[in-house]
Image (cartoon, grey):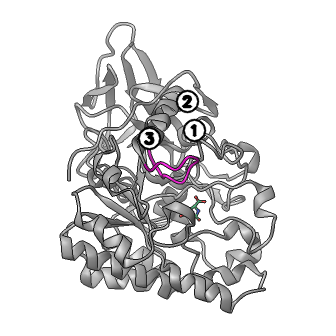
Amino acid sequence: MTALLIRHPRILLPDGEFLLGDILIQQGKIVQIAPEITAPDGSNIIDATGLTLLPGVIDPQVHFREPGLEHKENLFTASCACAKGGVTSFLEMPNTKPLTTTQAPLDQKLQLASEKCLVNYGFFIGATPENLPDLLTTNPVCGIKIFMGSSHGALLVSREAEIEPIFARGDRLIAVHAEDQARILQRRQEFKGITDPAIHSQIQDETAALNATKLALKLSQKYQRRLHILHLSTGIEAEFLRENKPSWVTAEVTPQHLLLNTEAYEKIGTLAQMNPPLRSPENNQILWQALLDGVIDFIATDHAPHTLEEKAKGYPNSPSGMPGVETSLPLMLTQAMAGKCSVSQVSSWMATKPAEAYKIPNKGLIKTGYDADLVLVDLDNYRPVLREDLQTKCGWSPFEGWNLTGWPIITIVGGNIVYERGKLNTEVRGKALQFGKN
Ligand code: DOR
């Protein structure tokens, strides 16, 4: 593998400061960071003058649909979207077909990913009311996913009596989709017949989210069990966590829960439909503050593609979910450039903190000895999100038309360039992520 020298970017260092310097990559690792480095013979040199070098994004919650739902997305198209979006590693959810609830489907996913993925990959095992032994033994997984609500079939584990044994046994990270299924079912009946997609946010309301988050936290406290709360959507949950979050609990928020709200239904209809639903603009503000204050630890996209045909079925037959991996970094960097937060905070929320939370070694920082998973972004130019540029197979984004900066110019995975100025290198393959013990 030839050495790679990146010349003169603004390099984000682990202390949050920037160094205008050079960075040398050999054998997939960062070997030197210095104001000036002499290129070893035969190295590949990138002139990155004017660009900013950040650790590659680790997206800790995505749905990539393979196997079984490839009409929406597959591991190749999704990982192309990752490469274009500066996402160098992802953690994928178990609601594929077959469900990832035992070792065999996990092995199948790992095999498919090794053949198809341009970026690094890791997978959750999904809890069912019956698979406790598998939750304890299946390997390698980044954690156990519990759909407390908003799911159906085997992956729904909604009753306390079913959830508690999962918290009681083992020590793996438990990641919860926290919505109260009983309340959702009851409200679905109350609002039956309404086809305006805006009703989605009232059916799966803030109380449904809060009830489930409180239950997960109660069980985590009872068993001192490592808990991660996925896609926090409401201010009341954030305020509850501000008062009650133990040191072993983490929470995440999506860019769409920070930047979109119930006003989006009028503009994009069912494309704004997701679980947990979008909330009011006041919730955007409270979630932002919780993120800035560290109550919310990091960012995930919940990339959940559905086809435009499926979305056109009309509420309530339209599926919930929206894509996100190729817009998340520019969306957040645009917020940083607008003064809402700093570039180093964005990088901490999108790379460093996810690596820490899931105990992924040697990733999430630009540091000697760390893996060369990197993204060079341009913070000086603005470009709109255009449907024709998208790599995700579903072919749409809820952010179409948004004018963003911080677009990736070059994405590097394990020292290999996977994306450069509009072109993907589809020859490169990522690696299976490793996860330390809690
Ligand atoms: O909106 C959502 N869609 N939320 C989820 O948690 C699941 C996802 C999907 O898989 O479509």
**SS assignment at label 3:** helix
Check if mark 2's residue and mark 1's residue have beta carbons within 8 Å: yes
Coordinates of residue 295 in the picture (x, y in percent): 31, 73
Q: Quadrant of residue 128?
A: bottom left
Residue 143 or residue 90, whichever sits in front: 143
Mark nearer the N terminus (2 vs 1): 1
> Label 3 is placed on what type of residue?
Leu
Alpha carbon of mark 2 to alpha carbon of mark 1: how far? 6 Å
Alpha carbon of mark 2 to alpha carbon of mark 3: how far? 15 Å
Provide the major secondary structure of the magenta segment: loop
Magenta segment includes 432 = no
Left or right, 237 with respect to 33, comes to right
Mark nearer the N terminus (3 vs 1): 1
Residue at which label 1 appears:
75
Check if mark 3's residue and mark 1's residue have beta carbons within 8 Å: no
Q: Residue at x 33, y 44 (%)?
A: 138
> Label 1 is placed on what type of residue?
Leu
Q: Quadrant of the N terminus?
A: top left
Left or right, 171 with respect to 138, comes to left
Residue at which label 3 appears:
106
Residue at which label 2 appears:
116
Magenta segment boundaries in residue numbering: 89-101
- Whether residue 119 is visible here, answered yes or no, is no
Q: Quadrant of residue 220?
A: bottom left
> Label 2 is placed on what type of residue?
Lys
Question: Which mark is nearer the camera, 3 or 1?
Answer: 3
Pointer 1 local density, CA inside 10 Å: few below 14, some 14–19, many at least 20: many
Coordinates of residue 286 in the picture (x, y in percent): 43, 81
Magenta segment includes 90 = yes
